[in-house]
Image (spheres, grey):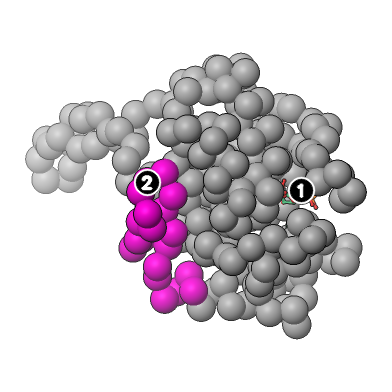
């Protein structure tokens, strides 16, 4: 389902269904309702591959026919959206993984300096009880994601990966520098950032498009 571009830690998805849905959210004519629905669907499709490396443990169960050994996911998974736009990815992921917990990090990018400003940190106290998946549709300069990962590490998270929809090379490079070893999953790797820090071709401001605040 996925294709690894260069070396891990960057995995860029190469799947016709995801590419099709990405064309919907990139299109400026897509209004907030279909934008939100499609973004959530893409996140749900991506999480299937992102969890491939998660460990399982054997359990004994009784089927209607016989006793057998089945597999359950080990540890407690925590999904952490970066507000606002990351929230739009949660429903699609929880559809596939309803038992996951959700922590919240609020970060807003200052439009002049492009530096992230943190305004919310609500994470489970035992966040190290299992893998943590950070979700944010946009990885632009990487400032927000880098700050979010630092907050996760300070809270005790050890096994962290990130899902974004659109990544810019600048953001990938920043994360590889600030947090070596982190795996980044992206639905698309775009070309560059413009002088306002927007991803090109990108999809515009994800939070504004999602909530109709453009
Ligand atoms: C967007 C996006 C990321 C950030 C990416 O959020 O959802 O969090 O920008 O940019 P960066 O990689 O350069 O830090 P924004 O700060 O616009 O907040 P919002 O989701 O509330 O609109
Ligand atoms: N944040 C967004 O929402 N879009 C971009 O292109 C860059 C940062």
Quadrant including the C terminus: bottom right
Residue drawn at 47 percent across, 23 percent down: 158
The front one of 173 and 124 is 173
When asked about the image quadrant of residue 63, the answer is top left
Whether the residue carrying mark 1 lies under 8 Å from ligand 1 is answered with yes
Q: Position of residue 99 (x, y in %)?
A: 49, 38
Magenta stretch: includes residue 13: yes
* C-alpha distance separating marks 2 and 1: 28 Å
The image shows residue 92, relative to residue 127, as above or below, that is below
Q: Which residue is mark 2?
A: 8
Determine if residue 79 is in view.
Answer: no
- Closer to the chain start, of discs 2 and 1, is 2
Magenta stretch: includes residue 166: no
- Please state which of the two labelled residues, at mark 2 or mark 1, is closer to the viewer: 2
Q: Position of residue 186 (x, y in %)?
A: 50, 56
Q: Residue 148 bears which disc, if any?
A: none
Q: Secondary structure at mark 1?
A: loop
When asked about the image quadrant of residue 200, the answer is bottom right
Q: Which residues are magenta?
A: 1-19
Task: Give the crowd class for mark 2: few <14, some 14-19, many >=20 residues within 10 Å.
Answer: few
């Amino acid at each position: 389902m996925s294709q690894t571009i260069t070396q891990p830690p960057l995995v860029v998805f190469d799947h016709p269904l995801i590419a099709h849905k990405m064309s919907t959210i990139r299109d400026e004519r897509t209004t907030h309702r279909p934008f939100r629905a499609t973004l959530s669907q893409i996140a749900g499709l991506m999480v299937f591959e992102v969890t491939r490396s998660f460990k399982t443990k054997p359990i004994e169960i009784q089927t209607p026919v016989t006793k057998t050994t089945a597999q359950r996911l080990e540890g407690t998974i925590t999904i952490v959206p970066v507000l606002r736009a990351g929230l739009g990815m949660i429903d699609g992921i929880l559809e596939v993984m309803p038992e996951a917990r959700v922590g919240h990090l609020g970060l807003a990018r200052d439009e002049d300096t492009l530096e992230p400003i943190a305004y919310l940190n609500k994470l489970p106290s035992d966040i190290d009880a299992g893998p943590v998946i950070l979700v944010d549709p946009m990885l632009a300069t990487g400032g927000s994601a880098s700050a979010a990962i630092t907050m996760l590490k300070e809270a005790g998270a050890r096994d962290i990966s990130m899902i974004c929809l659109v990544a810019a090379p600048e953001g990938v490079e920043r994360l590889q520098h600030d947090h070596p070893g982190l795996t980044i999953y992206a639905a698309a790797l775009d070309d560059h950032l413009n002088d306002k820090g927007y991803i090109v071709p990108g999809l515009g401001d994800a939070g504004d498009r999602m909530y109709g605040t453009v």
